[in-house]
Amino acid sequence: VQLQASGGGSVQAGGSLRLSCAASGRAFTSYGAGWFRQAPGKEREFVASITRSVGTTYYADSVKGRFTISRDNAKNTVYLQMNSLTTEDTAVYYCAARPPGRAVYDYWGQGTLVTVSS
């Protein structure tokens, strides 16, 4: 599975962005997917995830109520809708895929930069 993240950019605080993660390979529909981020000088952190079939979602407390993860299996794409952005959301965002039966994310996209200005 190869992942291509896109949709990053610069936005003012309070604005919105939608990130996309396009995956290659038919097996992606059976994979869990997630978004992570890494801010300058900080470690990478979990943002949101979605299961492969039922589409159950999980969120970090810092983004709950503002971000929404979704997936379109027909398009092999996972999205992250980000609303009410703050400067604390500035980071490189990575999408990742977790194969069935695996507890870790084995596949990672290249990252897309989100910059939120005050």
Image (spheres, rainbow, N blue to C red):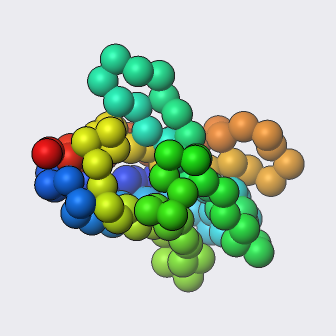
* 115 relative to 5 in the view: left or right: left
The residue shown at (43%, 39%) is: 37
* 81 relative to 15 in the view: left or right: right
In the image, residue 55 sits, relative to residue 43, either above or below, namely below
Query: Residue reaching furthest top?
Result: 41
Q: Position of residue 57 (x, y in %)?
A: 66, 63
In the image, residue 44 sits, relative to residue 107, either above or below, namely above
* 6 relative to 58 in the view: left or right: left
Q: Position of residue 114 (x, y in %)?
A: 26, 46
Depth order, front residue of 65/2: 65
Figure quadrant of the C terminus: top left
User: Does the rendering let one see residue 38?
Assistant: yes
The residue shown at (48%, 29%) is: 44
The residue shown at (54%, 77%) is: 72
Depth order, front residue of 31/44: 44
Depth order, front residue of 94/75: 94
* 11 relative to 98 in the view: left or right: left
User: Does the rendering let one see residue 113?
Assistant: no
The residue shown at (35%, 30%) is: 39
Q: Position of residue 51 (x, y in %)?
A: 72, 63
